[in-house]
Amino acid sequence: MLVVWIVLGLLLVALLWAVMAYNRLIRLRNESEQGYSAIDIQLKRRADLIPNLVETVKAYAAHERAVFEEVTEARARTLSAGNVGDAAAAERQMRGALGRLFAVAEAYPQLRASENFQQLSAELSDTEDKIAAARRYYNNVVRRFNTAQQTLPTSLLAGPLGFRPREFFELEDEGDRAPVRVSL
Amino acid sequence: MTLQEQIRSNRVRTALVLLGFGVLTLAFVAVIAGAYDPGIAGLIGIVSIVYGLVSWFAAGRIIAAASGAHPVTKAEQPELYRILENVSIAAGLPKTPDLYMIDDPSPNAFAAGRNPDHAYVAVTTGLARLLDERELEGVLAHEVSHIRNRDVRLMSLAAVLVGVIALASDMLMRITIFGGGDRREGGLGAFGAVIGIVAALLAPIGAALLQMSLSRRREYLADASAVETTGDAEGLASALAALRDDHRPLRKVTRATAHLYIESPLRDHRGLRSSLGGLFDTHPPLEDRIRVLEEMGGFQLPPAADQPPGQSSSF
């Protein structure tokens, strides 16, 4: 009789643990989805600035067609990206294209002096900071989510219940700030 | 302790503080009713509870008024707002908190509010002037972490409850001195006065206990979360070093709100602090916080100019 109670008790404990572990995984998955949509909002915000920017630069440097096409293509790719990998690839392309666009603008002092261009580049750099911030949040959450799935004992549950590690939103040139080890 | 554990523990502590406050109020009322007059006791009880509820919902505004903080718009402070927006996004807050400013040359900052949707970050004009962008980012990320970790709810609650206790004991003092006691015969007036004085003395001790229950560990945790948010331990560390090297006290600060700030605003209490061995400190020594950040980021700030070595740790 005693053995039965002990077994039942152990089962109950295991069940409680499973419920808590499952809830934690669900919470992390929701947070990482929220994190991704936060990046998406900022990417869309920037995409909205692009046509205006291209028009402004065109007014002063109409013959730099290759750069405009590159930026417009990167914008289309950003808007059609369906997953993290695509969005990150589009973002890399966009960074390169915008870099070249601003390099072109350097050669036109009148363009640089125009109020419209200055305002657009300020807004653009603000959006870029916000993309970086949203990316940092997303990657932090994904790191926690993936770690929870890969470490014991949660890993026993994560696989069978259909949790899959998420992709980081990674850009190759992470040179601006070195990663920091955080101990909570 | 992870973030979720911290949030959970804050929830439990909030409930405990509320319960403790309820018991305290009941005991207070019972003592007055026994020694004095049930009518007056009931009146004080009801006024305290109503005042407590009102303060809970208006906590943010009350704290703003007590600290001289006023809201500023994005147009007035575009740079600060931009940094605040960015760290809020990086911390995953549902919305950017409002920005308040305190006109004071002493650099300091705090966060207050009921929950992440009703919260604000207040900084002094001195902080905005003294720190560069990277340091401001560290400080704002620290405050935003308090909001995300649900520290602000507990800390705001503590601030207003300390106010309620002060109000109740104050009312009792007044009633004792200006009548009320006349209605009864004998030495009860004197007895009531004694109770009033004892209660008035207990209120600040209760305040100190409440603030200590808020644990200095949450400052370390908010520092660590801030670093996770910004990825830049050095910015926050050099901001803390700047706060350490500035000895101007805040002009408008009360004991009830002292624990809210990123660094203790009661700098003139330094003598008391050292004599009590840091027992009543609301904040851990800045030196220790900077050292933890240095270990996290693997860098070394230049030591304080005006402090002899070996005197910083007060535990």
Image: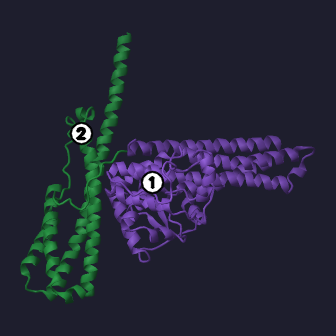
In percent of width and height, residue B95 lies at: 39, 62
Question: Looking at this rendering, what residue extends furthest in the right direction?
Answer: B186
- Answer yes or no: do the residues labelled 2 and 1 have beta carbons within 8 Å? no
| Crowd band around label 1 with a 10 angstrom C-alpha radius: few (<14), some (14–19), many (20+) | many
Please determine if labels 2 and 1 lie on a single subunit.
no
Drawn side of residue B236 relative to residue A79, left or right: right
> Is residue B136 positioned above or below A170 on the image?
below
In front: label 2 or label 1: 1
Give left or right: position of A179 versus B143. Answer: left
Residue closer to the observer: B41 or B231? B231
Note whether residue B242 is visible: yes
User: Few, some or many C-alpha atoms within 10 Å of disc 2 (few <14, some 14-19, many ≥20)?
Assistant: many
Q: What residue type is labelled 2?
A: Gln
Which quadrant of the rendered structure holds the N terminus of chain B?
top left
Image position of B39 with respect to B55: above or below: above
As drawn, the chain in green is A
The residue at which mark 1 appears reads as B146
Residue B214, percent from left and from top: 53, 46
